[in-house]
Image: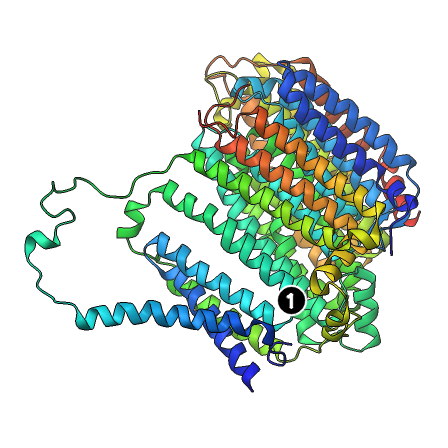
């Protein structure tokens, strides 16, 4: 019962803050709502016994990515956008589509036949020395080695892209 | 599935968060109840007895901040990958060393590139 | 389970291409001669192609990666595309004033992403390949840093691309939640064993996949980004984007839809058929009213995605091989057309207006002749390769029993003749308006020679490529 209450709290706050992120007039407020959103997602990860992911959620998302967002918001100097209408004319259509999609997805999700639990159950993880991080490490550095190496090239492209697009003077 | 497991180890953090929220809100509420409210025009100016500010307080940040933040995110993500690697390094051994070296070498190339392109300089 | 040397041996082409891209990035820091970087890139890609051909077929990395005829054929399309793109870029980048080595490196990273998409047999690998390809292409679309159109192109592509990635991830999450695996074959066998193939959740994830890949191949109604992006991006990158990511999208689509979603084939065919018709309609009809040639070719590229979808709908080795065959031919004719467009671009003159082609045949008969061949091929007039490609596509669809769909496709093909041949008409039947000088260069000439040779040889001897495509599916 207590777990359900916690889950309901996190779920409701996540939905509310994500609406506030897109509905706030002031983009800085949007970023701050997003911060709250990320913390609650981390809480949800904790409820799934995914401690490592919860920590990553806070370090990477709340720590690094939000700083990037904040810089970009301040970089854009959105004066007109704050004063103007927050939503364009197609807002009604978009709202109808979004609600329709939400209805379709949520009604479908009730029919989800849960997949097999697999070997990494909560009990197994808690019984392992090192817990979450050691399990993630073991899976990522043996079975998922190939995707892991692709990730490094994606990060490299992100470095190149940021410099190519935003560096003021590129020596050429 | 969420709704079945309670991370009871995190109870202290929950209590801490609740106390922090309570103190933060409590101070504000208590202040609004007990403080004196005697506003007059001079008091409401941004700088009492100073010049009136001109223009808006928002100003454009330099795009340099963006590059710095972006590089920070990239290397932050890289550092996060190192953590589970360090935990399992003992059990996987040399094999894990090689794959992490591949990962790091690719990113070091990016680091050298960013350095040489003076992305860390504030020109 | 740890990977062995046999696993690593299967990805040698990918490793080589990654090292090449890193090398080019480092060369950018030390050399002033950027065209040299491009040449090294071409040589490296040729070596990669050779390595691809000698790699032993088989699966690797706990069944996440596969080397088979299907992936190799697509990889050859990507290599052809990247070599042609580098050839047409060398002079063009100088004209645009963005002669930077990162360009070549990013093109190779995008190609690496496509290769991973074509070889991935695990949804996570396919997703990462797609992100690698997309991220590099976003940057390349905005490579003209000081031009607002290019910035717009990159931003629109990025926003809608990120949106479509979210759909892909949601689809992956749903299938994973149902089956507990991201491996394509395991998904199919799990749903058949447990009799949950008809479960609405599986259908929902199928729709998510269609949306995500529909964005990548620019199929209507997910094509909105394409015209603005193709118009604003550097012309060489427009050529690159209209072939590579599209072919990669088809490659991943073929794998995901036949391997993982095989049990519900009839369901996804029923969704894709209206999408194919709409794509052909939107592409061919809106292209008629365009005055900018890059924008026109963007709509034409949408329409061609609609044709290629026929191969996917027809299915089987015949349908898939005709789709692969068509994408290869499309690489030749489309990059060729863009090479001619690039030739018209010089300092202070865009040469993107269809009006600029007035009387080109009088001033520059060779360039006009080449454009004529490419336009004929895009329309599908014999004896060009475009005809052969369409012929095999339509035949395979008819044999699979989709005669009505083929009739629709033929009608739209006829409509497309209007806007392709309008350019030919401008070139041959109008008086030249102003002096148009061509900015030719040796690499551009080589690219034109390769593409025109490809279009004509495949048009006259179609058996070469259709055998190759079929053999690669069986082998």
Q: Compared to C441, does C9 lie above or below? A: below
Camera sees residue C297: no
Quick one: label 1, few (<14), some, or many (20+) residues within 10 Å?
many
* Quarter of the view holding residue C332: top right
Q: Which residue occupies the foreground of this view, C253 or B16?
A: B16
Residue at (12%, 67%) from the top-left corner?
B36
Quarter placement of the N terminus of chain C: bottom right
Q: Which residue occupies the foreground of this view, A97 or A118?
A: A118
Q: Residue furthest bottom?
A: A1
Q: Compared to C221, does C88 lie above or below? A: above
Q: Secondary structure at mark 1?
A: loop
In percent of width and height, residue C92 lies at 58, 20
**Residue ID for mark 1:** A50
Chain containing the residue with disc 1: A
Residue at (65%, 63%) from the top-left corner?
C171
In percent of width and height, residue C196 lies at 76, 76
Q: Compared to A147, does B106 lie above or below? A: above
Count up the numbered dots.
1
Q: Compared to A164, does C470 lie above or below? A: below
Residue at (51%, 14%) from the top-left corner?
C436
In percent of width and height, residue C96 lies at 52, 21
Residue at (51%, 27%) from the top-left corner?
C352
Q: Which residue occupies the foreground of this view, C184 or C412?
A: C184
Camera sees residue A37: yes
Q: Which residue occupies the foreground of this view, C151 or A125?
A: A125
In percent of width and height, residue C139 lies at 56, 36
């Amino acid at each position: 019962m207590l777990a359900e209450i916690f889950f309901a709290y996190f779920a409701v706050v996540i939905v509310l803050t994500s609406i506030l992120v897109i509905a706030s007039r002031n983009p800085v407020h949007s970023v701050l709502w997003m911060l709250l959103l990320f913390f609650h997602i981390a809480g949800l990860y904790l409820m799934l016994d995914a401690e490592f992911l919860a920590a990553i959620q806070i370090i990477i998302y709340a720590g690094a990515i939000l700083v990037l967002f904040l810089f970009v918001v301040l970089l854009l100097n959105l004066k007109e956008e704050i004063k103007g209408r927050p939503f364009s004319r197609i807002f009604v259509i978009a709202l109808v589509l979004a609600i329709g999609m939400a209805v379709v997805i949520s009604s479908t999700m009730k029919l989800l036949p849960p997949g097999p639990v697999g070997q990494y159950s909560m009990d197994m993880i808690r019984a392992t020395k090192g817990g979450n991080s050691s399990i993630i490490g073991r899976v990522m550095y043996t079975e998922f080695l190939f995707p892991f190496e692709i990730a490094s090239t994606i990060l490299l492209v992100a470095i190149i892209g940021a410099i190519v697009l935003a560096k003021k003077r590129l020596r050429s | 599935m969420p709704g079945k497991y309670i991370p009871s180890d995190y109870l202290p953090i929950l209590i801490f968060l609740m106390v922090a929220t309570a103190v933060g809100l409590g101070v504000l509420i208590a202040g609004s109840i007990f403080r004196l409210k005697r506003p007059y025009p001079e008091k409401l100016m941004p700088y009492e007895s100073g010049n009136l500010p001109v223009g808006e307080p928002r100003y454009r940040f330099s795009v340099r901040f963006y590059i710095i933040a972006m590089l920070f995110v990239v290397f932050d993500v890289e550092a996060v990958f190192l953590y589970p690697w360090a935990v399992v390094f003992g059990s996987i051994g040399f094999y894990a060393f090689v794959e992490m070296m591949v990962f790091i070498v690719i990113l070091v190339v990016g680091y050298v590139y960013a350095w040489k392109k003076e992305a860390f300089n504030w020109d | 389970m740890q990977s062995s040397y046999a696993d690593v041996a299967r990805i040698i082409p990918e490793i080589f291409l990654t090292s090449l891209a890193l090398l080019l990035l480092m060369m950018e820091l030390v050399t002033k001669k950027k065209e040299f970087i491009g040449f090294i890139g071409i040589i490296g890609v040729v070596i990669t192609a050779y390595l691809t051909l000698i790699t032993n077929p088989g699966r690797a990395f706990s069944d996440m990666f596969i080397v088979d005829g299907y992936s190799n054929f697509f990889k050859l399309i990507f290599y052809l595309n990247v070599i042609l793109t580098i050839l047409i870029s060398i002079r063009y980048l100088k004209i645009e004033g963005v002669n930077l080595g990162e360009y070549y490196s990013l093109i190779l990273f995008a190609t690496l992403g496509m290769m991973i998409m074509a070889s991935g047999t695990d949804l996570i690998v396919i997703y990462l390949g797609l992100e690698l390809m997309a991220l590099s292409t976003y940057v390349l679309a905005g490579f003209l840093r000081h031009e607002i159109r290019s910035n717009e192109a990159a931003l629109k592509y990025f926003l809608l691309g990120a949106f479509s990635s979210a759909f892909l991830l949601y689809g992956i999450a749903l299938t994973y939640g149902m089956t507990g695996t991201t491996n394509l074959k395991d998904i199919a066998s799990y749903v058949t064993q447990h009799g949950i193939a008809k479960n609405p959740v599986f259908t929902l994830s199928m729709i998510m996949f269609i949306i995500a890949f529909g964005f990548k191949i620019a199929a209507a109604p997910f094509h909105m980004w394409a015209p603005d992006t193709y118009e604003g991006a550097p012309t060489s990158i427009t050529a690159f984007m209209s072939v590579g990511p599209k072919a990669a999208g088809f490659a991943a689509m073929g794998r995901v839809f036949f391997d993982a979603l095989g049990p519900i084939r009839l369901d996804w065919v029923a969704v894709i058929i209206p999408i194919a018709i709409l794509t052909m309609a939107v592409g061919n009809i809106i292209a008629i009213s365009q005055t900018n040639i890059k924008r026109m070719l963007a709509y034409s590229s949408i329409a061609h995605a609609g044709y290629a979808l026929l191969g996917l709908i027809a299915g089987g080795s015949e349908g898939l091989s005709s789709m692969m065959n068509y994408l290869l031919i499309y690489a030749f004719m489309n990059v060729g057309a863009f090479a001619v467009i690039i030739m018209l671009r010089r300092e202070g003159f865009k040469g993107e207006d269809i009006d600029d082609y007035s009387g080109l045949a009088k001033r520059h008969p060779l360039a006009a002749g080449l454009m004529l061949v490419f336009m004929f091929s895009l329309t599908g007039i014999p004896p060009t390769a475009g005809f052969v490609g369409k012929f095999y596509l339509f035949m395979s669809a008819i044999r699979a029993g989709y005669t009505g769909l083929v009739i629709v496709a033929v009608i739209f093909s006829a409509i497309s003749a209007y806007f392709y041949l309008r350019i030919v008409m401008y070139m041959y039947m109008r008086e030249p308006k102003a002096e148009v000088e061509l900015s030719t260069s040796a690499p551009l000439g080589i690219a034109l020679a390769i593409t025109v040779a490809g279009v004509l040889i495949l048009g006259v001897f179609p058996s070469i490529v259709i055998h190759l495509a079929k053999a690669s599916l069986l082998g």
